[in-house]
Image (cartoon, rainbow, N blue to C red):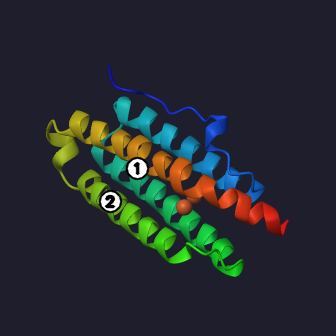
Amino acid sequence: MMLTRVDWSNDLKVGVPLLDAEHLGLVELFNDFIASALSDTDGLHLGTHFKDVVSAVRDHFASEENMLDRHNYPRFAAHKAHHHRLLAQAETLQADWQSAAPTMGGRDSLLARTIDYFTDRLLHHIREADRPYRPFLMRLA
Ligand SMILES: [Fe+2]
Ligand SMILES: [Fe+2]
C-alpha cells in the first residue's frame, strides 16, 4: 500500500519559526499534490502542479541558505551543495511529470518515485541536515 500523505511531526522542527513555517508549507503543498495525483486530475494539470511544488522547494532553499550564510554557518558550503543535488532531483521529477509519461500508464510508478523523493530525500534532509543547524542558530538568538 502506497503512502498517500506525509504527516508533519515534531522531529521535523528546527526551532526557527520562519524555517519551520516553510517546511510545514512544503509538507502541505506536497500533500495537495499527492491528493490530486491520486484523483483523476489530468496529466497536464499535474505537471503544472508539481512545478509549483518544485518552485516552493527552490524558494525555501534560497531562504534557508540566506539565513545560514548571514550567520556564517560553518557547514554552509556542504549544506548548499546538498540543496543543489536535491533540487536537481526534483527538477528531474518535474520533467517526468511534464512529459507524456503520466498519461501513458506510468503515473503510479512516477507517483511512487515522487513520494520516495519527498520522504527519503527531502524530509531526510530536514531531519539529518537542517536540524543540526538548530543549536547554531539558537546560540545567536
Ligand atoms: Fe530546510
Ligand atoms: Fe536545508
Q: Whereabouts is ligand 2, in terms of quadrant?
A: bottom right
Circle 2 packing at 10 Å, graded few (<14), some (14-19), many (20+), is some
Residue flagged by tag 1: what amino acid is it? Answer: Arg
Ranked by sequence position, the earlier of labels 1 and 2 is 2
Pick whichever, 3 or 103, lies toward us: 3
Q: In the shown orientation, is residue 102 left or right of residue 135?
A: left
Give how far across and how far down residue 49 sits, in percent.
43, 51
Quadrant of the snapshot with the C terminus: bottom right
Residue at figure coordinates x 20%, y 41% from the top left: 103
Q: Which of 48 and 128 is in front in this view?
A: 128
Kind of residue at disc 2: Gln
> In the drawing, what numbered circle is on residue 89?
2
Residue underneath mark 1:
121
Q: Do the residues bearing badges 1 and 2 touch, measured as CB atoms within 8 Å? A: yes
Task: Give SS at disc 1.
Answer: helix
Residue 46 located left or right of residue 132: left
Q: Residues within 10 Å of mark 1 (few under 14, many from 20)?
A: some
